[in-house]
Amino acid sequence: MGREIGTTEYTRSQRTRYRQELRRNLDLFESFLDTAEFIDEGTVGVELEMNLAETEGMAPALLVDTVLEDLDDEDFVHEIGRFNLEANLPVTHPTGTGLRDLETELTAKMEQADAAARRHGARVIPIGHLPTITEQLFTGEDWRAPGARYEALENSVMEARGEEINLRIDGEGKGLDTTFDSIAPESACTSMQLHLQVPPEQFAAAWNAAQAIAGPQVALAANSPFLLGKRLWHETRIPTFVQALDTRPPELATQGVRPRVWFGERWITSMFDLFEENVRLFPALIPESRDMAEEPLLTEGSSPRLHELMLHNGTVWRWNRPIYDPSTDVPHLRLENRLLPAGPTAADMAANAAFFYGILHTLVHERRPLWSRMSFEQADESFQQCARWGLEARVRWPKVGRVRVADLLRDQLIPQAMDGLRTLGADAEVTEHYGQILTERTGTGRNGARWQIDTVTSLELRGASRPEALAEMTRLYREGVDSGEPVHAWPVPARQRSRTS
């Protein structure tokens, strides 16, 4: 869904033709995957989605067109919301100082975007959910960024669903229970997406490893506890994204039809398993054929473009998504990790990346793979529990039993991740730096979500209303981003002491 399309509505014959071509693409990809040569450099990449907020009051600022025009930089692009902005970072390696360089680049991109936003009375907020979003923002169509692909996506989701989208998430009080006549809540979800180039023979192991550690990974980085004024999950992006793009009315969900934002249901043996599942289980949302896109299936001397298969793959939002990229003479395969929120600081995000790349390298090369010692259902349960409770979650883990995830991370997974980075060739200073950030985060129990919750609680105890507390917390959050300090070191406003007689 990262490319523009030509129309927002499709005929039945176009949908039928697309299905035929999709299956043809799948057959071609199967044989190509078995015989072709792929680039294997182990490179890593990052996409960072951010929010625009008004300087005064921190409400969402619908200024992305103006800010992008000001930036005039192809590394910055639209996202679905008019208050969203995406930065694409240069490809790098996890060896040497690569992750430190990533932190430097993240800082530079955020500062560049923030400088442009400030010229128009706004600030850039790298966070999972902008806390000041209200339901009123989503009552019309002003929230949506321009582009046929976004309109077509919304039309297709709402047509398939056949009724309004119900957003129902447990949390304080009765939680959140509201309906929308659009996919607008999806725009509230801003993430940091990590890419890892993987050879075909290692892809299944890498994907299985990423699924197995998804729970601890999201607990470590949780940064989205507030949505529409309610305190909900520590990583509320997870249920919000699932529900905002859910094409199933309740009856189909009850029948076991899979959601399009999907954890999955089994370990795999090949990358092909995921593409085959996508075609077999999910109808097309954007059935634009390669003829409509004026794109050939094959060109002399290059890899097959597989337009229909790639477009379809982009409308099944797996938390760990397979990517086939034919853009060069020699194609490559990537694992796209999509479950992390944006923010808080460049140091935090680089540390999150260090954990992911390091732990994957360790787990892929274990003699007895982690996923052979746990069920897929156990991995899914861990993911859900950690998204809900963050570092306070308790999970079942092989050889450990039921354990607090912060302790599991500190005692086992973070050391394993740093060992993996050292094996990859990361400099000693790099592994020490990010290992310390991650260990101190788990030791204090303060990730971005915990800091937000504690700060809002403190402000409310001092007399602020919820909207006032969320606006002030967002302002303090931006100050924390400006400091460059990792979130576990950010101060929390002191709670007003009660008077004693």
Image (spheres, rainbow, N blue to C red):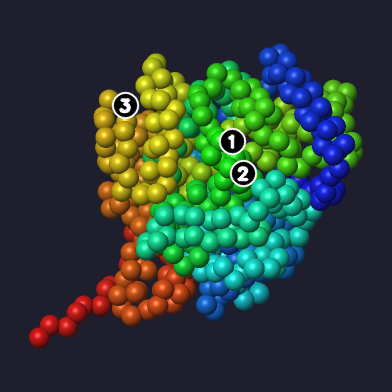
**Would you say 267 lies left or right of 1 here?**
left
The answer to whether the residues at label 2 and label 1 have Cβ atoms under 8 Å apart is yes
Helix, strand or loop at label 3? It is loop
Q: Position of residue 481 (x, y in %)?
A: 47, 62
Q: Do we see residue 43 in this rendering?
A: no
* Disc 1: which residue: 257
Q: Amino acid at mark 1?
A: Val
* Disc 2: which residue: 248
Q: Do we see residue 181 in this rendering?
A: yes
Q: Position of residue 390 (x, y in %)?
A: 37, 49
Residues 30 and 349: in front is 30
Tell me which label, 3 or 2, sits earlier in the chain: 2
Picture quarter with the C terminus: bottom left
Q: Position of residue 19 (x, y in %)?
A: 79, 31
Helix, strand or loop at label 2? It is loop
Helix, strand or loop at label 1? It is loop
At horizontal 72% and vertical 27% (from top left) the residue drawn is: 331
- Tell me the distance, in whole angstroms, between the alpha carbons under discs 2 and 1: 7 Å
At horizontal 39% and vertical 16% (from top left) the residue drawn is: 367
Q: Does residue 91 sit above or below 345 in this rendering?
A: above
Farthest residue in the bottom direction? 501
Q: Nearer the viewer, mark 3 or mark 2?
A: 2
At horizontal 66% and vertical 48% (from top left) the residue drawn is: 161
Tell me which label, 2 or 1, sits earlier in the chain: 2
Residues 310 and 8: in front is 8
At horizontal 64% and vertical 30% (from top left) the residue drawn is: 281
**Would you say 248 lies left or right of 15 here?**
left
* Disc 3: which residue: 398
